[in-house]
Image: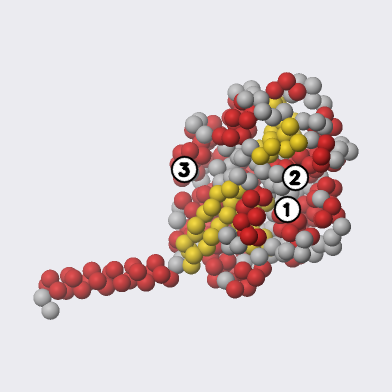
């Protein structure tokens, strides 16, 4: 074999190996509602650092306006898994459509209720939310649930206010700036940006453990990776690989400063203010789980909160052990 023929053969072998590796990748359709929010920073970090690919996964991410829309994609069959709020697992169990959380990304939500415009000065407590137009990421999402919970605590009914879908990025900022809403439930960096402009008055804040306990009465899990149990049964290797990648991403976040984390993120996530974005990340890092594990205590708090305003959950017998599992996290290899 001549030198040229050997070179051609080597190239052909390399191409064949590349094609084999590509074909071996497991394709996963992942839905998320508002990926630009720091609520979902672990998803973006895990993707941008290539940890999904390292696990042999080809993850196609579809970003929706809010968590409720991502859930709809899962139930409609256009997504395999979701990074969304844990409370959706309980709600779906109440409807006899079980989904299970397999990795916890956020230990507490980071949601903020803020007043916008002329009604801010006169606000004294959740009872004053009656009659207001309240911006949430999307009706049926966890930002919506936070305000429903606070209203229920004040003796109000869900229909005592109206709820507008404003997303988790520039559309939420625009709605507040234009005075289209009286109140807003959102997350950083949106909240930090509006607060820096003195455009809002913060009245409830779950960006800390203390604030979360004050609002919800206990620990309240935030973003998780959830999926139908049937998917895990059919695709255990894919679920384990997803878990491995996410836990690796969580550990990377915990071990790096905010400035380095910001460099990994897409520039558009900074909403045009990188200094504020870095500060937002720095204050958000304690929100994220260090190991991906879910706890019984936080699941109990979630069930208690949902029963206050969701009649389906209130009237259902919920097996909390079926709403989450640490079985995949337990098998994550140490690095």
Q: Where is mark 3, residue-wise? A: 266
Residue 87's mark? 1
Residue 15's mark? none
Which comes before the other along the chain, label 1 or label 2?
A: 1
Residue lying furthest left: 2
Asked if the residue at tag 3 contacts the one at tag 2, i.e. Cβ–Cβ closer than 8 Å, the answer is no
At mark 1, the secondary structure is helix
Asked if the residue at tag 2 contacts the one at tag 1, i.e. Cβ–Cβ closer than 8 Å, the answer is yes
Residue at image point 89% right, 38% down: 155
Residue at image point 18% right, 71% down: 8
Quarter of the figure with residue 73: bottom right
Nearest to the observer: residue 306 or residue 241:
306
At mark 3, the secondary structure is loop
Which comes before the other along the chain, label 1 or label 3?
A: 1
Q: Is residue 167 visible?
A: yes
Nearest to the observer: residue 121 or residue 327:
121
How many numbered markers are drawn? 3
Q: Is residue 220 above or below residue 199?
A: below
Quarter of the figure with residue 89: bottom right
Q: Nearer the viewer, mark 2 or mark 3?
A: 2
Residue lying furthest bottom: 1
């Amino acid at each position: 074999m001549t030198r040229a023929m050997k070179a051609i053969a080597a190239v052909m072998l390399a191409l064949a190996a590349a094609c084999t590796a590509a074909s071996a990748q497991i394709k996963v359709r992942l839905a998320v509602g508002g990926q630009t929010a720091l609520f979902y920073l672990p998803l973006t970090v895990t993707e941008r650092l290539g940890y999904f690919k390292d696990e042999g996964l080809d993850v196609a991410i579809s970003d929706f306006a809010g968590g409720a829309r991502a859930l709809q994609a899962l139930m409609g069959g256009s997504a395999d898994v979701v990074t969304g709020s844990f409370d959706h697992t309980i709600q779906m169990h109440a409807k006899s459509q079980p989904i299970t959380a397999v990795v916890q990304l956020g230990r507490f939500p980071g949601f903020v209720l803020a007043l916008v415009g002329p009604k801010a000065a006169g606000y004294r407590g959740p009872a004053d939310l009656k009659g207001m137009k309240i911006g949430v990421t999307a009706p049926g999402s966890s930002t919506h649930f936070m305000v429903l919970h606070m209203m229920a605590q004040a003796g109000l009914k869900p229909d005592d206010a109206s709820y507008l879908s404003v997303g988790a990025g520039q559309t939420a900022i625009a709605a507040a700036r234009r005075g289209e809403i009286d109140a807003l439930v959102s997350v950083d960096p949106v909240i930090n940006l509006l607060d820096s402009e003195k455009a809002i008055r913060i009245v409830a804040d779950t960006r800390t453990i203390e604030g979360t306990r004050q609002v919800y009465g206990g620990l309240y899990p935030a973003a998780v990776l959830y999926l139908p149990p049937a998917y895990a049964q059919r695709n255990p290797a894919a679920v384990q690989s997803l878990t491995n990648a996410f836990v690796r991403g969580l550990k990377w976040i915990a071990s790096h400063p905010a400035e380095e984390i910001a460099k990994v993120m897409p520039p558009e996530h900074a909403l045009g203010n990188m200094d504020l974005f870095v500060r937002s990340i720095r204050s958000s890092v304690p929100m994220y789980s260090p190991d991906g594990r879910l706890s019984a205590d936080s699941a109990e708090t979630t069930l208690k909160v949902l029963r206050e305003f969701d009649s389906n959950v209130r009237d259902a017998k919920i097996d909390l052990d079926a709403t989450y599992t640490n079985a995949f996290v337990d098998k994550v290899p140490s690095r």
